[in-house]
Structure formats: structure tokens, C-alpha cells
């Protein structure tokens, strides 16, 4: 007969781990006023209307260029303000060629009204630059759907659709701008000394951060980059490159990832504790994926915290603590 797992012991271990990792944060958190979390796009949306707010061209950790188009929902009104932006890798990656990724980007840009700019450009860099110049200054409306299946973070992807939504008259656009301006004072109405507020901001744009284990339902920590900071709401807009996604996350659920200048002995000791290496077949723990299924794969790369594992249908990073050597 299989030995039953002592859940009380496991819970005690996890509570001890929580106590160590929180580093006294609870003393501050328990005294603060409760705030509602950021809203997310639901799955299965059809013919929703969004509007771009900005865009940027940057390089990822491998030096490859990418574009992120920032946007938020206009309709349906109950989702107004929810982020619906998109990330575009403009180089080859493990899933697509450079041509496929560029085609996906320019196809979406044509769908939201940039066909003339693309067709008149001499090359991809000129077309991208001209598109960014417009998106950095103007708000472009678009129609989109969302996927019916979420990714591992429970998020649904955005798909632009062809439409004539930008043919609305100037008067309607001016009314929308006025409504947006009317909403801003309410957001800034909380009295707080400016100097004190500035000192209390724990992050800056560009910081590498990770979520706390209790933020996402799956209990995992995810790494991302700070793109925007909202001091009034004490939120950061975090871009998660792995999932092509950006979310607003409260400061209290984020931690800075410190640059490791010296790894030496600590790295060697950590490596000695890892029971597998690159090329080994490993399996996930039963609590890692939402479906509770244990999956086997091959280790492709490793660092101190994560391993890139090639499974039967995809390759993804998995925390070392959620992997064990397969028999």
C-alpha cells in the first residue's frame, strides 16, 4: 500500500518558506488599505475595440530587436482601460524564422491602418520607424479578438482584425479625449507629499523584477521588466517576454532581481545540489502545471534557478525546484 503524504508536514514546510521569503513584509502589508488588483482580458472576445497609447522599439536580453505596442480596451465598456497591447519579436526565435515574425508584425500593422506606410517604405527598418513615429504621437483604434485558450499564466492573446473603426469623425474622438482627461484628476486626487511619494518608489523603468509566489494562482514566480510606474496606484506595468504579455502588478508583489557579480563558491555548491544536468531526462512535479499532470522532457539549458526543458509539444523554462531526474 502506498504511503499517504502527510499534508500537515508539507504545509508547515511551505509556511516556513513563506516566512523566510517575505522578509518582514507582512508587518507593513497588514496595516495598509486593501486595493483591488488589475483587471485582465477574458477569453473568447470578438469584435472588441482597443486604442493604442504608445509603442517602443527595444532589444531583448539576446540583443534581438522587438516592438511593443501599448494599448487599452475601449469597448466593451465594462472592460474599458484593461491593457490589450502586443509584443512582436523582429528576429528569429526558437519557434519562428525572422521572416515569419516580421510578417506577423507588418500584417497586424496593415490591419490597424498602416498599409500605405508599409507599401511606400524602402525596407523593413524604414517601415518600422515610420509606424513608430505615428504610434508615439497618435492614438490608433483597432478591432480585436482574444484567444479561447489561456497561456500558462491564465492570460489570453490578442488578435487584431480588419475594420474601418478609424473612420469615425473628429468630433467623436475629441469627446473620447475629453472623457479621458476628466478621469485623470480622480486618479491623482489622493493627498500625498510629492517628495515622500518619490522616495517610496522601490523600482525604476528598466529594472528586472520577479513576482512573489502568492501573486499568480499557480504559485510560481515569473521574471519581467518594469515598463511603466504608476505612483498613485502603486503599480508597475511589467512586461513578461516569455509570454509576450504585460500586466499591472502591485509593488508589494514584486521584488528586484539583483545582478550577480560574484557567483564562485555559491554557484558551485548550488550546482552540486542539482541532481541532473544538460541532456538529462527530467519530469515536472505534480503541482507545477495547472492540469496536475507530470510531464517528461530533456534539459537544454540551465542556470542557478531555472532549466530550459524541451517537452513533446513545446520548450519552456521551469524552476529547478519543480523538476526531478526521471528514472
Image: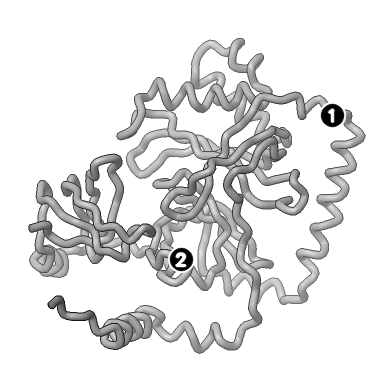
Secondary structure under badge 1?
loop
Nearer-the-camera pick, 216 or 174: 216
Q: Is residue 231 above or below residue 81?
A: below
Q: Position of residue 133 (x, y in %)?
A: 64, 29
Q: Position of residue 16 (x, y in %)?
A: 32, 86
Tell me where residue 3 sits by quadrant.
Answer: bottom left
How many other residues sit within 10 Å of disc 2, few (<14), some (14-19) or many (≥20)?
A: few
Mark 2 → mark 1, Cα distance in angstroms: 41 Å
Quadrant location, the C terminus: bottom left
Secondary structure under badge 2?
loop
Residue shown at 40%/57% (left/top)? Answer: 223
Nearer-the-camera pick, 46 or 121: 46
Q: Is residue 277 above or below residue 31?
A: above
Task: Count how many numbered circles sit on residues in the image.
Answer: 2
Nearer-the-camera pick, 112 or 27: 112
Q: Earlier in the sequence, mark 2 or mark 1?
A: 1
Residue shown at 33%/40% (left/top)? Answer: 62
Q: Is residue 73 visible?
A: yes
Quadrant location, the N terminus: bottom left
Residue 31 in the figure: left or right of residue 13: right
Q: Position of residue 196 (x, y in %)?
A: 65, 76
Residue 149 in the figure: left or right of residue 180: left
Q: Is residue 30 above or below residue 60?
A: below
Nearer-the-camera pick, 190 or 291: 291
Q: Which residue is mark 2?
A: 217
Q: Which residue is mark 1?
A: 168
Residue shown at 60%/55% (left/top)? Answer: 40
Amino acid at each position: 500500500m502506498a504511503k499517504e503524504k502527510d499534508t500537515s508536514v508539507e504545509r508547515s514546510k511551505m509556511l516556513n518558506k513563506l516566512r523566510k521569503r517575505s522578509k518582514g513584509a507582512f508587518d507593513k502589508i497588514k496595516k495598509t488599505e486593501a486595493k483591488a488588483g488589475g483587471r485582465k482580458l477574458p477569453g473568447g472576445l470578438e469584435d472588441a475595440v482597443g486604442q493604442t497609447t504608445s509603442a517602443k522599439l527595444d532589444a531583448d536580453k539576446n540583443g534581438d530587436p522587438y516592438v511593443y505596442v501599448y494599448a487599452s480596451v475601449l469597448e466593451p465598456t465594462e472592460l474599458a482601460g484593461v491593457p490589450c497591447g502586443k509584443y512582436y519579436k523582429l528576429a528569429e526565435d526558437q519557434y519562428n524564422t525572422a521572416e515569419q515574425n516580421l510578417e506577423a508584425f507588418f500584417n497586424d500593422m496593415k490591419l490597424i491602418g498602416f498599409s500605405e506606410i508599409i507599401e511606400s517604405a524602402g525596407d523593413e527598418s524604414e517601415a518600422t520607424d515610420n509606424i513608430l513615429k505615428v504610434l508615439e504621437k497618435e492614438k490608433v483604434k483597432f478591432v480585436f479578438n482574444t484567444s479561447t485558450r489561456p497561456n500558462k499564466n491564465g492570460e489570453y492573446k490578442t488578435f487584431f482584425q480588419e475594420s474601418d473603426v478609424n473612420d469615425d469623425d473628429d468630433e467623436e474622438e475629441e469627446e473620447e479625449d475629453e472623457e479621458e482627461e476628466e478621469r485623470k484628476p480622480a486618479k491623482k486626487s489622493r493627498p500625498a507629499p510629492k517628495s515622500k511619494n518619490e522616495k517610496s518608489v522601490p523600482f525604476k523603468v528598466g529594472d528586472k523584477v520577479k513576482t512573489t509566489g502568492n501573486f499568480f494562482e499557480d504559485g510560481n514566480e515569473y521574471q519581467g521588466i518594469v515598463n511603466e510606474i504608476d505612483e498613485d496606484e502603486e503599480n508597475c506595468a511589467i512586461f513578461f517576454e516569455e509570454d509576450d504579455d504585460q500586466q499591472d502588478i502591485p509593488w508589494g508583489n514584486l521584488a528586484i532581481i539583483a545582478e550577480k557579480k560574484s557567483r564562485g563558491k555559491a554557484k558551485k555548491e548550488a550546482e552540486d545540489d542539482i541532481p541532473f544536468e544538460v541532456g538529462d531526462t527530467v519530469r515536472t512535479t505534480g503541482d507545477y502545471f495547472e492540469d496536475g499532470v507530470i510531464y517528461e522532457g530533456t534539459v537544454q539549458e540551465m542556470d542557478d534557478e531555472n532549466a530550459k526543458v524541451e517537452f513533446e509539444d513545446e520548450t519552456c523554462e521551469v524552476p529547478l525546484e519543480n523538476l526531478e531526474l526521471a528514472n
